[in-house]
């Protein structure tokens, strides 16, 4: 079951917020934690569940089924490790947000 505040996906919010801010249907931000923004591209509907993660000019794509890095552009190994740990910790919530957004 979705936690309160996860029924919609929003851009913005605090350091560990799952909601809050400006709504964008095409690129919904589902999580901001630490220094990272986690979001979906609405055009990714046909792909297996995954999340995109940005910080500054760096970007990564992380699979949510078996948490793994699909793509990394610019993140150092330590940052990528932090991202994977965060995704593993929040995997259930991220998958629920994926299914809410794409269903």
Image (cartoon, rainbow, N blue to C red):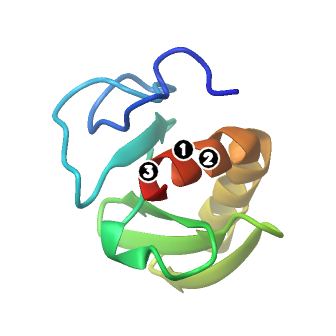
**Mark 3 residue element:** helix
Q: Mark on residue 94?
A: 2
Residue 78 position by quadrant: bottom right
**Mark 1 residue element:** helix
Residues packed near mark 1 inside 10 Å, few (<14), some (14 to 19) or many (20 plus): many
- Taking the image as shown, residue 81 lies to the left or right of residue 66, namely left
Residue 71 position by quadrant: bottom right
Q: Is residue 73 above or below residue 98?
A: below
* For the residues bearing labels 3 and 1, Cβ distance under 8 angstroms: yes
Please give the name of the residue rendered at 62% of the width and 27% of the height, measured from the top-left corner: 2
Q: Where residue 67 appears, x then y in whole percent?
A: 78, 66
Residues packed near mark 2 inside 10 Å, few (<14), some (14 to 19) or many (20 plus): many
* For the residues bearing labels 2 and 1, Cβ distance under 8 angstroms: yes
Residue at image mark 1: 97
Q: In which quadrant is the N terminus drawn?
A: top right
Distance from disc 3 to disc 1, alpha carbons, whole Å, reads 6 Å
Please give the name of the residue rendered at 27% of the width and 58% of the height, measured from the top-left corner: 27
Q: Is residue 70 above or below residue 7?
A: below
Q: Relative to the observer, which residue lies in front, 41 or 36?
A: 41
Residue at image mark 3: 101
Q: Where residue 90 appears, x then y in whole percent?
A: 70, 40
Q: Relative to the observer, which residue lies in front, 94 or 89?
A: 94
Q: Of callouts 3 and 2, which one flags the residue occurring earlier in the amino acid sequence?
A: 2
């Amino acid at each position: 079951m979705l936690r309160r505040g996860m029924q919609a996906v929003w851009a913005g919010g605090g350091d560990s917020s799952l909601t809050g801010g400006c709504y964008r249907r095409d690129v919904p931000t589902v999580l901001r934690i630490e220094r990272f923004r986690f979001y979906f591209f609405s055009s990714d509907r046909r792909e297996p569940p995954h999340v995109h993660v940005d910080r500054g000019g760096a970007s990564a794509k992380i699979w949510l089924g078996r948490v793994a890095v699909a793509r990394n552009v610019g993140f150092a190994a330590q940052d990528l490790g932090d991202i994977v740990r965060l995704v593993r910790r929040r995997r259930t919530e991220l998958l629920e947000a994926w299914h809410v957004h794409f269903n």
